[in-house]
Image (tube, rainbow, N blue to C red):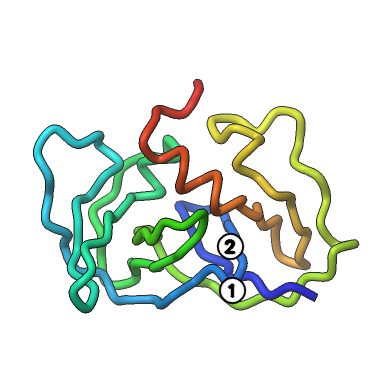
């Protein structure tokens, strides 16, 4: 069994391995950096460490929305990098057995399939499990359309 944090981006649910999460913080504006791509919100100071903040909604090509009271920054560490991920809301912690994970679909829309670890069906919806190391590594380059 692996535990995943399920979170919302728009109407969709995504999940990341709970072991890759350092902490969950309420939303506070990041310090913007000049000439940054639109999905970079800026940087934040996390107990003396400067951490980049990526807006996953914008990164995955979803319509832009101004952060509100349900938005949180999920601070993750994967692939040797610590990054803050701005998400719409945290939904749940899920226990997922490996046999519950279906492979990513051949066509995943705007999200490249190499960023998807798999898909889990819940009674209410589908949850797209992200490969966090690849998702963080890909934030510096544009997603293929």
Left or right for 2, reference 23: right
Residue 45 at x, y = what percent?
18, 69
Q: Residue furthest top?
A: 145
The disc at residue 94 is none
Q: Is residue 145 above or below residue 45?
A: above
Q: Tell me the mark number nearer the camera, choosing from 2 and 1.
A: 1
Q: Residue at x 47, y 71 (%)?
A: 90
Q: Is residue 127 above or below residue 56?
A: below
Q: Residue at x 76, y 65 (%)?
A: 122
Q: Residue furthest right?
A: 99
Regarding mark 2 in the picture, which secondary structure is present there? strand
Q: Marks 2 and 1, how far apart in space?
A: 9 Å
Residue 115 at x, y = what percent?
60, 42
Q: Residue at x 34, y 69 (%)?
A: 72
Left or right for 36, reference 124: left
Q: Residue at x 39, y 76 (%)?
A: 24
* Quarter-of-image position of residue 25: bottom left
Query: How crowded is the residue under tag 1: few (<14 C-alpha within 10 Å), some, or many (20+)?
Result: few
Confirm or deny contact between disc 2 and disc 1 (CB under 8 A).
Answer: no
Residue matched to label 2: 16
Regarding mark 1 in the picture, which secondary structure is present there? helix
* Quarter-of-image position of residue 82: bottom left
Residue matched to label 1: 19
Front position in the image: 141 or 106:
141
Say how many tags the image has.
2
Left or right for 118, reference 130: right
Left or right for 19, reference 64: right
Image quadrant holding the N terminus, namely bottom right
């Amino acid at each position: 069994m692996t535990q995943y944090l399920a979170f919302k981006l728009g109407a969709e649910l995504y999940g990341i391995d709970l072991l890759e999460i350092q902490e969950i913080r309420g939303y506070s504006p990041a310090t913007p950096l000049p000439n940054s791509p639109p999905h970079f919100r800026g940087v934040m100071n996390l107990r003396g460490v400067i951490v980049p903040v990526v807006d996953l909604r914008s990164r995955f090509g979803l319509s832009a929305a101004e952060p509100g009271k349900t938005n949180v920054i999920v601070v993750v560490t994967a692939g040797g990098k610590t990054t803050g991920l701005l998400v719409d809301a945290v939904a749940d912690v899920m226990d997922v057995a490996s046999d519950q994970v279906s492979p990513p679909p051949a066509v995943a829309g705007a999200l490249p399939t190499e960023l998807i670890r798999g898909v889990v069906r819940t009674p209410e919806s589908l949850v797209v499990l992200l490969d966090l190391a690849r998702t963080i590594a890909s934030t510096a380059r544009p997603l293929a359309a």
